[in-house]
Amino acid sequence: ALLDLDGDDVDVAAVCVQCCCAEAAYNAFYAELLRLWVSRAKQKRRAFAVKLASWDALKSLESPRKASNLAKLASAVLIGPGLVGVADLFKPVDPQAALTHTNTLCFATVLLRDLLQYPDPDFHAALRLAAPRDDQDDALAAGLLAFISTKLSPPRGLPDPAAFDRRKHLLYQAILDPAAFRDRSGPPSKQKKKKKKRGV
C-alpha cells in the first residue's frame, strides 16, 4: 500500500526514515521499501523527500545506533543508486562535527565505510558526485577531507584493508579535485588536466 500512497512525499519519507532509525539494529526492509517507492514514480521528487527526511534525522541524532541506521539507509537509498552525493548529505551539520561529535562521527564512519565497499561501477559513480557542487561549500569539503584523512579507517576484519585505503585515497581526491572525476564512467585517468583544486 505504501508504494501506491498518494499522500505527501515528505511525510512518507519521514516516517520510513524515523522507523529505520528507531530499530534496535539496522533493518534493510526500510531501504528496500524506499528504493521501490522512489523508483515507482516521481523519482527526483521522492529522492529529494528522502534526502530532506535524512537531513532532519541527522540534525537530531540521539545515539550512535540511530546514526548507524541512518547512514546505512542513506547509503542504500540515496548514495548507492547515485541520487545524492556524499557531501550533500552533510550540509545540515557543521563539517567539523564529523571530527568531534560522537553521533555525527558514527554517521560519517558508517556511511563512508559502506561507500568504499561498493561494487566498482557504483563506487566510481559515487566518486563523481562526492564533492560539494557549490564553490561556497569549501568549508564542507575541508571538513570531509579532514575526516577522511584523520578518522576514517577500515572496519575490523576486512579481508583487504589495502584496497580500502586505495579507495579512500580516491574519495579524498574526488572531493579535493572534483573536476578530475566528474563526467567519467570508470576509474579516473592518471593523466589529469591541471585544474584548480579546493583549498584545504
Image (cartoon, grey):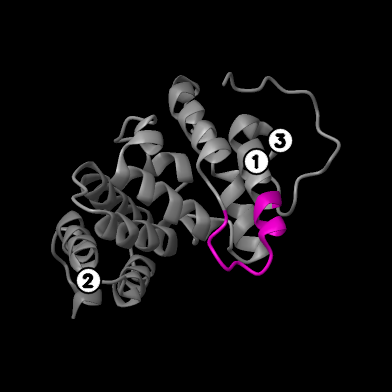
Depth check, front residue: 94 or 159:
159
Q: Which mark is residue 180?
A: 3
Calculate the distance from the C-alpha at mark 1 to the C-alpha at mark 2.
38 Å
Calculate the distance from the C-alpha at mark 3 to the C-alpha at mark 1.
6 Å
Which amino acid is tagged 3?
Ala
Residue 12, how many percent across, how many down? Answer: 18, 63
Residue 73, how many percent across, how many down? Answer: 35, 63
Q: Which mark is residue 70?
A: none
Residue 85, how many percent across, how many down? Answer: 48, 46
Single out the residue that lies furthest toward the right.
191
Residue at image location 21% in from the left, 70% down from the top: 23
Depth check, front residue: 168 or 126:
168
Whether residue 95 is in magenta: the answer is no
Which amino acid is tagged 1?
Arg
Calculate the distance from the C-alpha at mark 2 to the C-alpha at mark 3.
41 Å
Q: Count the labels in the image.
A: 3
Task: Write down the residue under mark 1.
Answer: 182
Instruction: Check contact, mark 3 vs mark 1: CB within 8 A.
Output: yes
Mark before the other along the chain sequence, 1 or 2: 2
